[in-house]
Amino acid sequence: MIKSIRFQNFKALRDATLPLGPFTLIVGPNGSGKSTAMQAFRFGSTLYQYQRRGDWITVGSELSSEVAVHFKWLLDETEYLTTTVLRTNASSPVKFSTRSIENNALERIIPPFLGYEGFRVFSFDANAIAKPVLTSPDPQLGEDGSNLAAVLDGLRDSDPERLEQMNRELNRWLPEFDRIFLATPEKGKKSFSLRTTVGHHRLPASELSQGVLLALAFLAVAYAPNPPSIVCFEEPDRGIHPRLFVDIRDAMYRLGFPENYGEKRKPVQVIATTHSPYLLDLYKEHPEQIVIAHKDEQGVHFERLSDKPHIDEILESAPLGDIWYSGILGGVPSAP
């Protein structure tokens, strides 16, 4: 699990530390670094690809002319600090190092989240989800939700019981549909449709609403048999009816706390962003899972909601979404 990420000169994040837990929901105004924080994984992964040949370089403390992202993470009860640096004015621009925090020794250990398969940053797009796709072995869901038909087809072949679970959950979320069907519109391609509960009519993906398609993509991630170590969702509430927000929350919890849902796999660390006070309301009992992104004249900084003074008394006064929207907690657009 990643415990925190420190950013230096990384886009809007001049010097900010993002605290993380098994599940973290980040709220804040536009331009407060929420999406930028997600991009840290891609930044680290890009530099990691350069370093796979074993050229591990210790990073110095002078970072004024560098872009740096520091991941503090936990593996087998040992804390490590992995630093990825891009020096803008040097002939050798890439640096990458991992140190054990316990003894400050350089470790030749590969951080499990820096390979592309170790993390995914999802920002679903309904048009991408609906498109027929080419079949392939071991299909993966695209970060925009593309390739869903191939993923469902692969699940049908490899784990039909899990697909049945997904069908039941789909019907619970959206009672107007009772089953997913797969088709071969042309050689080498797959598409999907949903069957209506009443009348058993099959509606192709191209005729399904945006909200239905986004819900399907969410279910595909939640029921993936072998999900990545870290999953990020950008605005998981976008395009979803507020009555389904509790299901979206539970789908993310299914990834992060599998033992509570009868799953026997390792937990997935989940990071999500939102602007929705309605989604935020669902986490009032878990302020340790909320991070407020503040933007002021000093720049952007992050604060865990549970670390705010007198937060228990504040949360007694109203729904969490209303309290955040009022501006009491920060993390809202500043007045001009």
Image: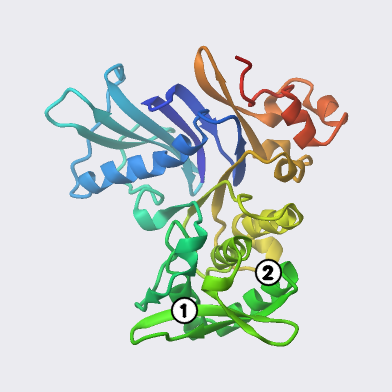
Question: Which numbered disc covers residue 191?
Answer: 1
Q: Residue drawn at (38%, 28%), measured in percent from left and top?
A: 10
Task: Check the image and name the residue furthest to the front.
Answer: 207
Task: Check the image and name the residue furthest to the left.
Answer: 91
- Image quarter for residue 92? top left
Name the spot of residue 23 as percent of width and height, x first: 61, 46
Instruction: Check the image and report above or below for 298 versus 105.
Output: above
At label 1, the amino acid type is Ser
Name the spot of residue 58 as percent of width and height, x first: 25, 31
Secondary structure found at label 1: strand
> How many circles with numbers are drawn on the protein?
2
Name the spot of residue 164 as percent of width and height, x first: 63, 81
Q: Residue drawn at (34%, 29%), measured in percent from left and top?
A: 68
Position of 153 compared to 209: left or right?
left
Q: Residue drawn at (22%, 49%), measured in percent from left and top?
A: 52
Instruction: Check the image and report above or below for 308 versus 130.
Output: above
Q: CA distance from mark 2 to mark 1?
A: 30 Å
Q: Nearer the viewer, residue 129 or 288?
A: 129
Q: Which residue is mark 2?
A: 262
- Image quarter for residue 291? top right
Position of 204 compared to 56: left or right?
right
Graded by Cα atoms within 10 Å as few (under 14), some (14 to 19) or many (20 or more), the crowding at tag 2 reads few
Instruction: Check the image and report above or below for 19 versus 242.
Output: above
Q: Earlier in the sequence, mark 2 or mark 1?
A: 1
Name the spot of residue 50 as percent of width and height, x first: 21, 45
Q: Residue drawn at (51%, 56%), measured in percent from left and top?
A: 124
Instruction: Check the image and report above or below for 335 versus 317.
Output: above
